[in-house]
Image (spheres, rainbow, N blue to C red):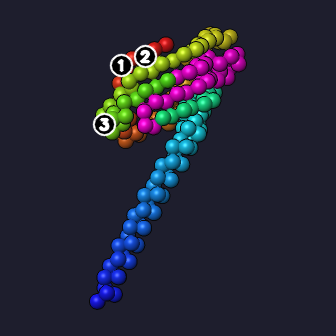
Amino acid sequence: MTTGNGSHRTKSRWALKTLLGLVLLLIAALAVATWKINSIAQTQINNALSEFLTAGGVVEDIDIHLLTGQVHLENLTIHSPKGFDATPPLTLKNLQLNIKLLSLLDEEDIEIQQLSLSDISLTLIRNKQGQLNLLNIIPDNEQKIAPKTIKEKEASKPLSIPAIHI
């Protein structure tokens, strides 16, 4: 009869070890995700700038704090479109964004508690054809960007920004 009890203990220990292993694996995955999130976000932002702007742009550094909802971007540069001086039409030294974390769970609104911009520079240049560089950083409908599908439009969440500091 002791073999039945020993078998039960072995199963309990196995289940406990499996549960502990899964918890440790989850903690390790979260640690790696937290550690790599800045480089992943920076790559995705730079890819999006290249995809959605005629000449692209670059963000040199990003710092995301998941637990507090803070995002800090440094040295954003929007490149000058073709046919214009090489001077970037937009540069931004710092962008600080505070997101209300619970709003990320909301199906309707994402609430930005604070948006701070510092050392922003806009440079307007008119080319020989009379066009402004800032009006040419986003492609026309016929150019790069494919129109959004109905599902993508429905999936977009509206933003609420109660304070903007420049």
Residue that numbered label 1 is attached to: 162
For mark 3, give the secondary structure: loop
Distance, label 2 to label 1, CA atoms, is 7 Å
The mark that comes first in sequence, 3 or 1, is 3
Please state the horizontal and vertical placement of residue 84, each as a whole percent of the image: 68, 17
- The answer to whether residue 44 of the structure is visible from this angle is no
Taking the magenta stretch, the answer to whether it contains residue 109 is: no
Q: What residue type is labelled 2?
A: Ile
| Residue 87 falls left or right of residue 99 | right
Crowdedness of circle 2 by 10 Å Cα count: few (<14), some, many (20+)? few
Q: Tell me: residue 116, above or below residue 70.
A: above
Q: In front: 49, or 16? A: 16
Q: Label 2 near label 3: C-beta < 8 Å?
A: no
Instruction: Choose between 126 and 112: the one closer to the eye.
Output: 112
Region of the chain picked out in magenta, as a range = 66-95
- Residue at the disc numbered 3: 106
Q: Is residue 77 magenta?
A: yes
* Residue at the disc numbered 2: 164
User: In the shown orientation, is residue 23 left or right of residue 53?
Assistant: left
Q: Nearer the viewer, residue 133 or 19?
A: 19
